[in-house]
Amino acid sequence: MKVALVHDYLREYGEAEQVLRVLHQMYPEAPVYTAFVDRKQLGDAIAIFDDWDIRTAPSQQLPGIATYHQAFRPLLPYCWEALDLSAYDLVLSSSGQYLSKSVLTRSETLHISYCHTPPRDLWDLPQTNGDRHWYQRWIETHLRQYDFYAAQRVDRFVTNSEVVARRIRKFYRRSAAIIPPPVQIQGSGEAGNDYYLYVGPLTKHQQPDLAVAACSQLDRPLWVIGSGSERERLQHLAGAQVRFLGNVAKEAMADLYAHAKAVLFPCQDADFGIAPVEAMGHGIPVIASASSGMRKVILNDRTGLLFTQPTVDSLCHAIVQFEGRRFSSQACIERAREFAEPVFVSKLEWFIAQAIDDHKAHPTQEPL
């Protein structure tokens, strides 16, 4: 089979790119089609993609696309549909905010989309439209309509969690198989007693301010790993025992985990969290929001704790509760192994094989 991979864009190395990396390991000869590549923003992570066959859409030629990629979203239908994928038998799209599932394929081609999420700014936040300019609302309405119809062209959907599967069913009227994203699991280690850890982007959506404020209020040591637009504000909010380490090389994380009491994962809207599962793979328990997809990952009172409200007081209460209990590092590791890369590959290979058989046997079958 001739296989092509399609990905929103390459400007960071986040959870979606980790999925793409494993897809490329599964199909190393497959070219990767993407809207644009921002080598400057990728920094050292560009080395991961150096020997890949990367083919960019016409959007790569738009002036300032790397900086103003959100402003160019109205042009996405033209950019994705300009790609010629007629030579491929199987197309795997890794799709999220930038709608890469919108590519056109032949009726004979099987298109499977690993949908990280339907775009949140199109589907989850219509109540903010009253504060936006009429032109922006008009653009979002048309993109929402286009996104819905593009989703109908996909043959099979896969996603990372029950949370996103429910959103796909609601917004696209499609069902999706659930295969959690691949996580690199160390499979050894145990929790320390020196500090709490926050690992992730410093953005409003990730809600790191809850972790910083809670540890400052309780006067607990917190080490913050990551970068983002919220860093300066968080530094003003932080107490004396909060340290900001910026981005940390992956090889240095094992030592940081070895001294951590727990990882704090406060984001209530997270569909899945690779970083907290990686931490569990080092034997570190996780304190996470019960509103997030992590409620299906963390075994409450066994591999961590879930706090019920997205507030500082609720997280403070969970931290105090956590310090009065014991958690098994081995239980954390065993749970994390259920999300290891080989598990992801095995499940996805089986799903693709079944989808190929169904596609050949029922070429005119209605989308699921």
Image (cartoon, rainbow, N blue to C red):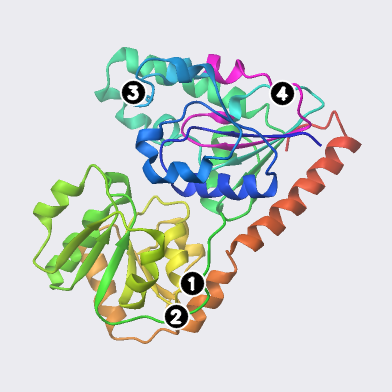
Q: Position of residue 85 (x, y in %)?
A: 70, 23
Q: Secondary structure at mark 4?
A: loop
Q: Position of residue 253 (x, y in %)?
A: 37, 66
Type of amino acid under label 2: Gly
Q: Are marks 4 and 3 in contact (CB under 8 Å)?
A: no
Residue at image mark 1: 281
Residue at image mark 2: 189
The stretch in magenta equals 77-100
Q: Secondary structure at mark 2?
A: loop
The numbered mark, 3 or 1, whose residue comes first in the sequence reads 3
Instruction: Tell us which disc is closer to us: 4 or 2.
Output: 2
Type of amino acid under label 4: Thr
The numbered mark, 4 or 3, whose residue comes first in the sequence reads 3
Instruction: Tell us which disc is closer to us: 4 or 3.
Output: 3
Disc 4/disc 2 C-alpha distance (Å):
47 Å
Q: Are marks 1 and 2 in contact (CB under 8 Å)?
A: yes
User: What numbered label is drawn on residue 105?
Assistant: 4
Residue at image mark 3: 68
Tag 4: Cα neighbours inside 10 Å, few (<14), some, or many (≥20)?
Answer: many
